[in-house]
Amino acid sequence: MDTGSPHEAGPDGPRGTIETAGGEPVWIALPPGLLRMRRLLLVVWLGLIALAAGLLPGLLAGPAWAAFALPPLALMAWGWVMIERNWRSWRYAERADDLLISRGVLWREETVVPYGRMQLVEVTSGPVERHFGLASVQLHTAAAATDATIPGLDPAEAERLRDRLTELGEARSAGL
C-alpha cells in the first residue's frame, strides 16, 4: 500500500495535520538540511580517509600505491546516492490519535506512537545539527520498543511538534 510521496505536505504546508478526506495520513517529509549535513559529513570523513590512504603510500612507496585512495572515493560516490535515498524515505504524519513515523529503503519501517502512551517528548540538537540549523524530536513511551526519533527538523518545527505532542499526550492520558 503506497501512502503517498514522502514530500507531500498538507494543504496548509508542513503544519498540515490529521488526515485527508479519504482517510489517508498527511505525510510530512524531512527538510533538505539533513541531506546536506549528512553528505558533508560523508565527504569530510571519506575524503580524509582517501587522502591518507592515497597520499601517504604514494609519497612513501611510489605513485602506484596512490591507488589505495580509490576504494574510499568509490564508497563516497555510492554513499552520496544512498544517503539521499535514505533521506527521502523518512516522513511523519500526525493523526487524530497517534503519530506515524515511516522510514527505510529496503526494509520499510512504520512506527505508530499513540499520543496517550507518550511519556516524554524531547528536542535535541548536537553541535553539527545546530550548525546546520537542525534539531531532532525524540519520543519516549513506556515500551522501549516504541521509542521513536524524527531527525533533521527545523528547530521551530521541532518545538512546535514537541508542544503539540505534549499537549495531545496530556489530553489523551488524562482518561487513563
Image (cartoon, rainbow, N blue to C red):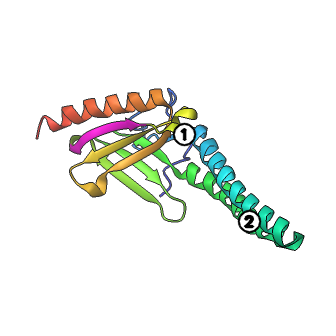
Q: Is residue 88 above or below residue 21?
A: below
Residue 136 percent across, percent down from the top left: 44, 40
Numbered disc 1: secondary structure: helix
For this orientation, the residue located farthest to the left is 176
Residue neighbourhood size for the residue with mark 2, other residues' Cα within 10 Å, grouped as few (<14), some (14–19), many (≥20)? some
> Circle 1: is it few (<14), some (14-19), or many (20+) Cα within 10 Å?
few
Residue at mark 1? 128
**Residue furthest out toward the right:** 63
Q: Quadrant of the C terminus?
A: top left
Q: Residue 97, position in %: x, y?
A: 28, 40
When asked about the image quadrant of residue 74, the answer is bottom right
Vertical position of residue 73 compared to residue 151: above or below: below
Q: Is residue 96 visible?
A: no
Q: Can you identify the residue that label 2 sits on?
A: 53
Residue 52: mark: none
Left or right: 138 in relation to 108:
left
Give above or below for 94 relative to 142: above
Q: Report the Cα–Cα distance between label 2 and label 1.
A: 26 Å
> Which corner quadrant of the image does residue 81 belong to?
bottom right
Which amino acid type is shown beneath numbered disc 2?
Ala
Q: Identify which residue is drawn at 33% across, 37% down.
A: 122
How many labels, in total?
2
Secondary structure of the magenta portion, mostly?
strand
Q: Residue at x 31, y 34 (%)?
A: 165
**Residue 123 forms part of the magenta stretch:** yes
Circle 1: residue type: Val
At 33% from the left and 28% from the top, the residue drawn is: 163
> Left or right of 20: which side holds 64?
right
Task: Out of 39 and 22, give the one closest to the viewer.
Answer: 39
Q: Estimate the x, y position of residue 104 in percent, counting from the top left.
A: 50, 58
Q: Residue furthest front?
A: 60
Which residues lie in the magenta part? 117-124
